[in-house]
Every structure is written in C-alpha cells, then in structure tokens.
Image (spheres, rainbow, N blue to C red):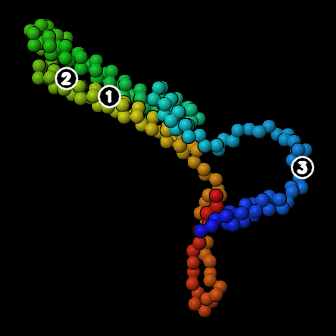
Amino acid sequence: MNLRPFILILLFSFVAECGFTQKDSLEIDSLKIKKKITKDSRIYDPLAPSKAAFYSAIFPGVGQIYNKKYWKAPIVWAALAIPVYYYQINNSDYKRYRNAYKLRKYGLVDEFTVNGVEIVSTQTLETAQEQLRENRDLSLLSGIILYILQIVEASVNAHLMQFNTDDNLTIRPQMIFDPIRIETPSVGLSFKYNF
C-alpha cells in the first residue's frame, strides 16, 4: 500500500490550516497586568502529606502546625504527655517494689518493713510488680500508638486539605420527563458533573 498520497494530503491540510487561520484582533503587547500575581492556594503539592508526616515524626504536633491546624498541636501534646506521665509513675513504683522484693529475698530490710514488721507481704510485692509492669507496658504501648496516630493524622489532613471542594463539583440530580411519550409518561434521571 502506498502511503505517500495520504501523507501529502495530511501535510497539506496542516499547512493550509496554519495559513488560513484567523488572526487575533486583540493586541496582547499593550496589555499590562496591574495586580500582583499571587500564588494560588489551591495548587496541588504532592509533597505536603509527606512533609507533614515527617515534621510530626521529628517533633509531635509540628505536622499539625504545618497544616495550619494550630488548635490540634496542644491536643497532640496532651495526648502524648498522659501516657508518658503514667509510664514514669508506673516505672518508678515498679522499681520500688522490685527493689523491696530483691532486698527481702536476700534477707535485708526494705522500705515496707517497719520495726521488723512486714507491712506488705512478699506475695503482695510480687503481685504489685506484675501489675505495675503491665501498666507500664500498656502506657508505653498507648504512647506509641498515639505517636503513630498523630503522624497519620497530619498526613491525612495534608491530603484532605488539597482536596477540591468547589461547589461546581456537586452532583445535582434532576427529573427529566420524556416529551415524546406523553401518553405513557416515563421518568428518567440524569446526573450533571461539573468540573
């Protein structure tokens, strides 16, 4: 099959289109912009979620500040301070009971022995150690979970801030009656998507 005539016709149509196009009647050279062009806040930044997550990972709450959700930062700090507080309390009590248990095992006087009388039994020292260790570990686990959740929240919020919520994106259902079939009315449904 010979493609030469087809290529020539295609080339000629492109050249003819460029040669016979209408010139623009507006003079763009004399147009001056008087307003300062500002950066559009709706420009999509693909790195914003990763920046927010990185900032939250380095210092909790900074990702929320990066997203300009300043009110969330104190909530993050308080949410992370609570498990840290309980971790320290449970850890110090665990060490107290652990040291007392060790001293009692070696036959020495511990802080729960007053005038040779044991205020707290050895069994109670063992139970308290187990309970305090469990509470300490739960405080650590809840702190880690809250730390991860605040990183995820900062990243998701950065994603959602860039989501286009313009009114033109709404779905407007409307009823359309078929004018051809008047005797037997039929009802249809159409959706208009405006982008």
Residue 162, quarter of picture:
top right
Q: Amino acid at mark 3?
A: Glu
Which quadrant is the N terminus positioned in? bottom right
Residue denoted by label 2:
129
Q: CA distance from mark 2 to mark 1?
A: 16 Å
Q: Amino acid at mark 1?
A: Leu
- Between the residue at mark 3 and the residue at mark 1, the CA separation in whole angstroms equals 69 Å
Secondary element at image label 1: helix
Does residue 21 sit above or below 75 in this rendering? below
Note whether 109 is above or below 25 in the view shown.
above
User: Disc number at residue 47?
Assistant: none
Mark 2, mark 1: which one is toward the viewer?
A: 1
Q: Quarter of the image holding residue 135?
A: top left
Q: Residue at x 23, y 15 (%)?
A: 96
- Give me the residue at 19% from left, 17% from top: 98
| Left or right of 38, for residue 124 | left
Q: Residue 31's spot in the image, x, y percent?
A: 88, 45
Identify the residue under disc 3.
27
Question: Is 176 or 39 nearer to us in this picture?
Answer: 39
Sequence-wise, the earlier of marks 3 and 1 is 3
